[in-house]
Image (tube, rainbow, N blue to C red):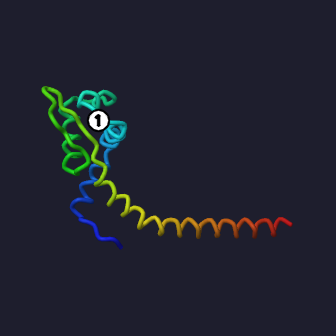
Amino acid sequence: MVKYSDSELNKVFHALSDSTRRGILARLAQGDAVVTELAEPFDMSLPAISKHLTVLEKAGLLRRHKDGRIRRCQLIAEPLQPAADWIKFYRQFWETKLDSLAAYLEKKQQNEDVLKK
C-alpha cells in the first residue's frame, strides 16, 4: 500500500465528511468566490460558514486572502490526490466482492432456470 501522512489524510477526510464543506468545495471548483457567495446556498450564519472555511483551510483545501474588505477563497485541489489514491487502493477489494456477488447471482439464476424446466 502507498504510504500517506495520516495526519494530512485525516484532515482531508474530516473536511470532506460534512456536506456543507463538500458544497463549498464544489462551488470553488467553478472558480474563486467571496465568503458571502459561498454562504448564499446554505441556511447558516456567516460565522458558521467561516468555521467550515477554517476546517477546509486547515486541511489545505482552501486558501483565503483579503482583497480590501472582501475575503476571497480559492480551491487548492492538491491535497485531494492522496485521498483519491487511498480510495483507489481499496477499490480493488470492493470490486472483487462485487464481481463475486455477480457471479453468485448469475449461477443462482441459472440453477433456478434449470429447475423451472
Q: Nearer the viewer, residue 60 or 32?
A: 32
Residue shown at the point (33%, 71%) measured from the top left: 2
Residue 107 sits above or below residue 41 on the image: below
Give x and y (percent) for residue 17: 32, 49
> For numbered disc 1, what is the local secondary structure?
loop
* Residue 32 percent location from the top left of the image: 29, 35
Task: Say above or below: 103 vs 83.
Answer: below
Where does the image place residue 102, in percent across and percent down from the top left?
Answer: 62, 65
- Position of residue 29 in the picture relative to residue 9 (left or right): right
Residue 103 in the image, given as x and y percentages of width and height: 64, 69
Q: Residues within 10 Å of mark 1 (few under 14, many from 20)?
A: some
- Taking the image as shown, residue 41 lies to the left or right of residue 8, namely right
Q: Nearer the viewer, residue 32 or 3?
A: 32
| 92 left or right, relative to 50 | right
- Taking the spot 86% from the left edge, 66% from the top edge, the residue there is 117
| Residue that appears at 42% across and 63% down | 88
Tell which residue pokes out farthest to the bottom in this image: 1
Quadrant of res 50 = top left
Q: Is residue 76 above or below residue 109?
A: above
The three-letter amino acid code for the residue at tag 1 is Asp
Q: Which residue is outermost to the right?
A: 117
Q: Quadrant of the N terminus?
A: bottom left
Identify the residue at the far left of this view: 68
Count numbered badges in the picture.
1
The residue that mark 1 highlights is 32
